[in-house]
Amino acid sequence: ANDAISLYQILHEHLKSKEKYACVSIGGVANQETIDRLVATGKEVVLAVDNDKAGAYCRKTNAALPYLLPVSKDWNEELKLYVQK
């Protein structure tokens, strides 16, 4: 859940995004069932995965979905880069 909160803070507070979106933690990228349920809603789904092997596997498994990838290890570390500016 912390990664979802960090991503929301980056988008909303630091990048001043005006888009309407929901940041949802799915309890790990191995939770394919939840990804499938989100896609089935018909809403646009964008993966925001960690920059690691699990994140790479999730992107490969869901190749049809767009994704966001932090420069850092994960979204918590990425937020620290924005806070330090």
Image (cartoon, helix red, strand yellow):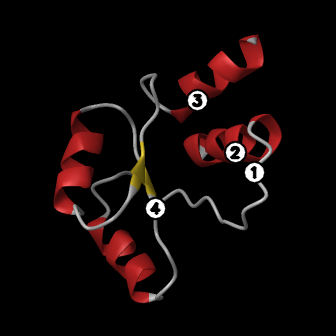
What amino acid is found at the position of numbered circle 2 in the picture? Leu
Measure the C-alpha gap from mark 1 to mark 3: 18 Å
- Residue tagged 1: 17
Q: Residue 62: in sight, yes or no?
A: yes
Residue topped by disc 4: 46
Q: How many marks?
A: 4
Instruction: Using a 10 Å C-alpha cutoff, classify the residue at mark 2 as few (fewer than 14 neighbours), some (14 to 19) or many (20 or more).
Output: some
Residue 11: which disc? 2
Residue mark closest to the camera, 2 vs 3:
2
Q: Is residue 19 above or below residue 34?
A: above
Q: Amino acid at mark 4?
A: Val
Check disc 1 and report its element: helix, strand or loop: loop
Specify few, some or many for label 4: CA neighbours under 10 Å numbering under 14, 14-19, or 20 or more. Answer: some
Question: Any mark on residue 76, and which?
Answer: 3
- Residue 48 coordinates in the image, percent (x, y): 46, 49
What residue is shown at x 47% (from left), y 88% (from top)?
A: 41
Q: Which quadrant does the C terminus fall into?
A: top right
Name the residue type under label 1.
Answer: Ser
Q: Residue at x 74, y 11 (%)?
A: 84
Cβ–Cβ under 8 Å for marks 4 and 3? no
Query: In terms of sequence position, does the residue under pointer 2 or pointer 4 come before the other?
Result: 2
* Left/right of residue 78 with respect to residue 52 in the rendered view: right
Q: The residue under label 3 is which amino acid type?
A: Asn
Mark 3 crowdedness (10 Å alpha carbons): few <14, some 14-19, many ≥20: some
SS label for mark 3: helix
In the image, is 72 to the left or to the right of 12? left
Residue 60 location (% of width, % of height): 17, 53
